[in-house]
Image (spheres, rainbow, N blue to C red):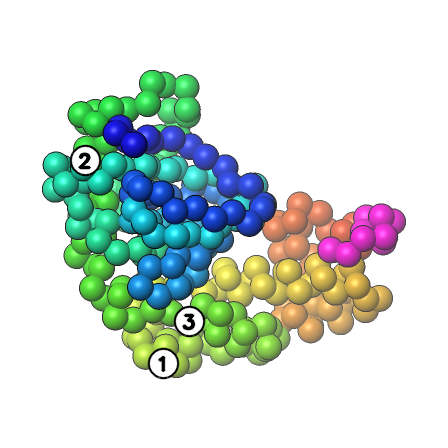
């Protein structure tokens, strides 16, 4: 690869694996994708609308789209990273939270779409991206590598107690972090806050129970941590685009699980 590529992509909901000879940065615009990075240690995360992931050349990564998603992807030849002084941004694999500058750049690419001619190595747009990435990633990389969240453990803790989950202060203390550091680290590897992540887990459990059981909506609401059936219905409609009752009828009519 001799020239950079900056474009919009959607990742399919199938498990894929890649290792390539160029650096890559993926920044979320909408939806989510899951990714496992196998650098010095395998770690997992999700790319959403508030975060991104940097994948240095030679790092294997397993990924899949989690439903409809839209990502800004920048592929960077290692030689270009050296000549622009941005190689520090690609020193290690990492998930990271977006700052205002990177978010604005991602929105500009989204507005442009994929119709324009791909940028070249001397394109000011590419150099602007590399400068913004270096400013965002290089200063924070040591802290990110010293302490990483165990997302699988946190997920297990939350799933085991959806009705009465541990609060953010407890999760931060168990991770050995301040609440602020925990919040920043959580957004960096999931693309969402811990509260929004918990809400998504609650709604996923509710969808499973609606499809696999005959429990009342009121009982399901309490089981997954909502105060009442009305609160569940409101959140479920916002997330899935239909009421819990409609979801249940549709899946029972098809005879398929949720």
Residue in front for this viewpoint, 100 or 18? 18
Q: Does the segment drawn in magenta span residue 250?
A: yes
Residue at image coords 26%, 28%? 3
Q: Is residue 198 above or below residue 35?
A: below
Q: Quadrant of residue 188?
A: bottom left
Whether residue 22 sits left or right of residue 138 in the image: it is right
- The disc, 1 or 3, on the residue closer to the chain's N-terminal end is 3
Q: Which residue is mark 1?
A: 173
Q: Which residue is mark 3?
A: 150
Secondary structure under tag 1 reads: helix
Q: Disc 3 or 2, which lies upstream in sequence?
A: 2
Separation of disc 3 and disc 2 at Cα? 34 Å
CB of mark 1 within 8 Å of CB of mark 2?
no
Q: Residues within 10 Å of mark 3 (few under 14, many from 20)?
A: few
**Where in the figure is residue 180, as x and y percent of width and height?**
30, 68
Image location (x, y in percent) of residue 72? 39, 37
For discs 1 and 3, the disc positioned in front in the rendered view: 3
Name the element at disc 3: loop
Which residue is more in the foreground, 211 or 44? 44
Alpha carbons under labels 1 and 2: distance apart: 41 Å
Seen at 27% across and 37% down, the residue is: 76
Q: First in sequence: mark 1 or mark 2?
A: 2
Residue ID for mark 2: 80
Bounds of the magenta segment: 249-258
Mark 2 lies on a secondary structure that is helix
Residue at image x 43%, y 39%? 71
Label 1: how many Cα within 10 Å (few below 14, some 14–19, many 20+): few
Q: CA distance from mark 1 to mark 3?
A: 13 Å
């Amino acid at each position: 690869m001799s020239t950079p590529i900056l474009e919009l992509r959607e990742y399919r909901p199938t498990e894929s694996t890649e290792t390539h000879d160029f650096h890559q940065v993926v920044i979320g615009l909408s939806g989510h994708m899951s990714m496992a990075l196998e650098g010095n240690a395998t770690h997992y995360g999700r790319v959403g609308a508030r975060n991104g992931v940097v994948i240095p050349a030679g790092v294997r990564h397993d990924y899949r789209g989690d439903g409809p998603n839209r990502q800004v992807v920048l592929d960077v030849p290692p030689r270009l990273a050296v000549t622009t002084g941005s190689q520090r941004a690609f020193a290690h694999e990492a998930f990271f939270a977006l700052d205002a500058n990177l978010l604005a750049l991602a929105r500009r690419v989204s507005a442009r779409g994929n119709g324009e001619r791909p940028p070249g190595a001397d394109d000011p747009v590419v150099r602007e991206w590399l400068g913004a990435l270096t400013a965002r990633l290089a200063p924070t990389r040591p802290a990110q590598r010293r302490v990483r969240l165990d997302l699988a453990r946190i997920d297990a803790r939350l799933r085991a107690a959806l009705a009465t989950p541990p609060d953010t202060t407890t999760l931060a203390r168990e991770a050995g972090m301040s609440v602020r550091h925990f919040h920043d680290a959580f957004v960096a590897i999931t693309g969402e806050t811990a509260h929004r992540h918990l809400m998504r887990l609650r709604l996923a459990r509710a969808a499973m129970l609606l499809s696999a059981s005959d429990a009342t909506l009121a009982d399901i609401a309490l089981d997954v941590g909502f105060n009442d059936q009305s609160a569940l219905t409101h959140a479920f409609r916002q997330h899935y685009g239909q009421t819990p009752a409609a979801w249940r009828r549709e899946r029972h009519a098809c005879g398929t699980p949720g």
